[in-house]
Amino acid sequence: MKKLLSCIIIGIVVLGGLGVVVTATHQNRNNPQRYVTTNSFYEDELDQSMTDYDGTLPVGYAILGNYTNLSVAQSFIPQKELLTRIQFLMACNASTSKPCIVAIRDNLTEENLAVCSLAPSEFPVVNGTPTEDQLEWIDFYCGDIWVTPGQVYYIVIYTKNIIGNFYWIAGNGTNIYPNGTAFLSVDDGNTWGEFTDVDGCFKTYGLRETFLEITMKNISFFGLSYEIKNVGNVTAWDVEIDMTVKSGIFGRIKFFGNGTASELQPGFTLGAGAGTIFGLGTITIFMRVYATNVKEMSIERNATVLLFLILLQ
């Protein structure tokens, strides 16, 4: 713990003396986010982590040499295409009153990709500097975020700048995590300093991307028939299917349908009919398919309806 705290205290002095280390165009902010929120039941997997505890430092307005409001960031390089949640080894001070905020960015000084917050009641409460057994792994769910494996991302942690409002976060004063490093800000995220020998205790979880294939039958009586096949290498979770059929003579043919599947394993197929369609004329069939770890895909086909007979063009 002494090594971690000494690194941070020296770093704060350096930040205070040099001013701008990394210039930001905006402070910490809550902007519209590029993420998908779902009621999913998928089984996500550990991606990146550093769990070797060496000590703690405060995030927020705590006394560390003097009154300083600290924001912390940890860079990491994901290996899975979907980031589902993040964990930090943390606690909160007994005087903490405002939420702990976590943001995900692909550039430390630019817009958030996602943001979430947790109230102090979600953390173990401590008086004074905590010991390791007083800390807990805290889950932050910021939505399911598509990321690029091999690219650097940043987890930014901060809270409201009020005296006595701070959280404790665990870390290590040696360079244990090889794919990232810690950053500190003492001015509400305006500027950041990098600490190459410091890492936070964190875990990221995610899913691998998979791919689906849509097939419509050429001829079908009494409705439309389709198949959704998983042509990727991992399970597709929470598959959603939406279908719309419109037009016909005088625009009288209309059909809306949907389907779901909790999972679709590699090589397996979902087959279904979309219900009875009756009429005369040309129709347009639009189908949209997506899943937690499948980017949205769609297909549009024209067909001719002769009473109950559907002929795909």
Image (spheres, rainbow, N blue to C red):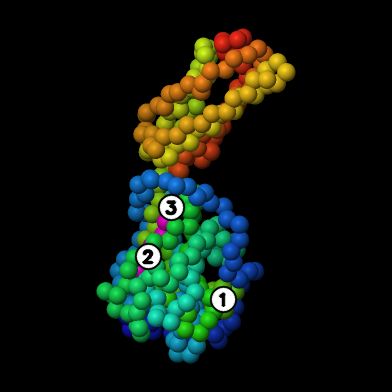
The dominant secondary structure in magenta is strand
Q: How many marks?
A: 3
Q: Amino acid at mark 2?
A: Ile
Rendered view: 159 above or below 219: below
Task: Locate residue 6, reporting x and y percent.
Answer: 39, 84
Using the image as rendered, state which of residue 206 and residue 54 is in the foreground: 206
Residue at 56% from the left image edge and 11% from the top image edge: 308
Q: Which mark is residue 188?
A: 1
Viewer-side label of 2, 1:
2
Q: Label 3's element?
A: strand
Q: Which mark is residue 138?
A: 2
Q: Which residue is mark 3?
A: 84
As measured in the structure, the alpha-carbon distance from the residue carrying label 1 to the one carrying label 3 is 26 Å
Does 27 appear in magenta? Answer: no
The answer to whether residue 303 is visible is yes
Can you give x and y, in whole percent of width and height, for residue 19 in the image? 59, 82
Whether residue 215 is situated above or below residue 230 in the rendered picture: above
